[in-house]
Image (tube, rainbow, N blue to C red):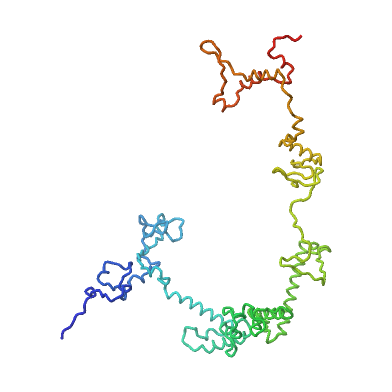
Amino acid sequence: MSSKKPADVASKEKNEYIPSFISKKPFYLEGPDSQNDYLEHQRLQNALPDQSKWYDRGKRLGPAATKFRKGACENCGAMTHKTKECLNRPRAKGARWTGKNIQADEVVQNVELGWDAKRDRWNGYDATEYRAVIEEYEELENLKKISKGGDANGQKLLTEDGDDGDAGEQEEAKYAEESDMGRQQSTATRNLRLREDTAKYLLNLDLDSAKYDPKTRSMVDMGAQADQAAALVAEDNFMRASGDAAEFERAQKYAWESQERGDKNKTHLQANPTSGEYYRRKEKRESEAKRESHRKQLLEKYGGEQYLQLGSTEKPAITESERYIEYDETGAVKGAPKVEAMSKYTEDVLINNHTSVWGSWWKNFQWGYACCHSTIKNSYCTGEEGKSAFEEANHIRTGTELEAPEVRQAIEMPPPTKEAAATDEATRKPQLQPKSDGTMENVAKKRTLTEMKGGVSEEELETYKRSRAVADDPMAKYLGKDELVS
């Protein structure tokens, strides 16, 4: 017999018929040994042994030292941490100075966790810690049995062997029977419906009818109005609040609350409605009497009863009327006159004899008064005279009066006199400049660029004032004459 040794994984050739998405190795699994087996990432991986490691919390290294060591914690005397990192209670005088109660060194572990172990929320959990929760639950159950009149010593705990299921079932049946019409009914029983009842969403399959909401188990979107589905919608989505319906709800609420509180006189609305109504009214009268007595005590102590009484003017006047009023889409009464919106600022206040307010007239980008055309605020009114003065000033400012022919003839200048003409001619003559041979040359004076940019200098202005001839000057006719006035 010839025994054939199985071929090593590394000696296997790459199978070309394996798809690339299977044979291709992810980039994060590439390693030094990845060349040996090209299908290593598809094989069953062995769990790393350090994935389940965890810190030994509170573990100490042997007995504690009896003498303080150099470099140890000054507070507790341990060598594995510094004073700032010490978790013991700060002492008034640390172990460095007293040398007493030196703590043992902690076990410092270097636990290297993998990717999964770092994100494992149950890593390091001790299952024996849940035993305390079970024991606390058992103690509560025993206290409940003692309060109900049972003997906890004669009964066995839930974890011990014994047949105590019958007693528990009887208790549960008792509670369920008592709260059949109350709030203690189980959720599973309350959500179930009778199998022979037709489902609400099957009553009307029309797409435009009322729709069934499976989350709230009610019909929504009032689409149907005259079918059986519409009646169900009215039953589910309409709360009856007229008549004795509200009073019945208050009575049912009182019965439920009395059962939940465990009162001595707890009532059941369906079993004994008379007693429930009696105790509810009695409690209501007692609460009102208590509230009224408390109110009287406060008024006797602090006073102020007169401020609580409404006067005749403060009492609301309630009147009844059969007058028909129709409103529009904005909420206003149809046909009523439109009410102007009131401003928070004062309006139509006339001051300083004005008949119009400031801002009632505007011209040339200025506001003013329409009564007198004044553009000065808080000025006195001048009436029609102010209007004419404004028009005249406007004509003078713009020059519109000069365009009229009669005005143009009235302001024509008189013809110049012989003396004035001779003076103007003399000023227009060019200046004489001496030549090299002794003769004079007429040269017109030209202004330089600096003089043109700088304007008229003071010297030129003074020369002009001295040389100009004024027609109204009585001494102008004597200019250029050497005759004496007799």
Which image quadrant for residue 11?
Answer: bottom left
Outermost residue, bottom side: 196
Q: Can residue 122 be seen from the camera position used here?
A: yes
Q: Is residue 435 left or right of residue 467?
A: left
Q: Nearer the viewer, residue 261 or 87?
A: 261
Residue 234 point in image, percent of width and height: 66, 81
Q: Residue at x 77, y 30 (%)?
A: 410
Q: Residue at x 56, y 22 (%)?
A: 446
Outermost residue, right side: 312
Q: Residue at x 49, y 89 (%)?
A: 163
Instruction: Name the quadrant of the N terminus.
Output: bottom left
Which image quadrant for residue 243?
Answer: bottom right
Q: Is residue 333 left or right of residue 465?
A: right
Which image quadrant for residue 50?
Answer: bottom left
Q: Nearer the viewer, residue 59 or 259?
A: 259
Q: Is residue 320 left or right of residue 53?
A: right
In the figure, 460 relative to 213: above or below? above
Q: Residue at x 79, y 39 (%)?
A: 388
Residue 52 point in image, percent of width and height: 36, 71
Q: Nearer the viewer, residue 115 or 43?
A: 43
Q: Is residue 49 left or right of residue 173?
A: left
Q: Nearer the viewer, residue 96 or 223?
A: 223
Residue 144 point in image, percent of width and height: 56, 81
Residue 34 point in image, percent of width and height: 27, 69
Q: Can residue 175 be seen from the camera position used here?
A: no
Label total for image: 0
Instruction: Name the quadrant of the C terminus.
Output: top right
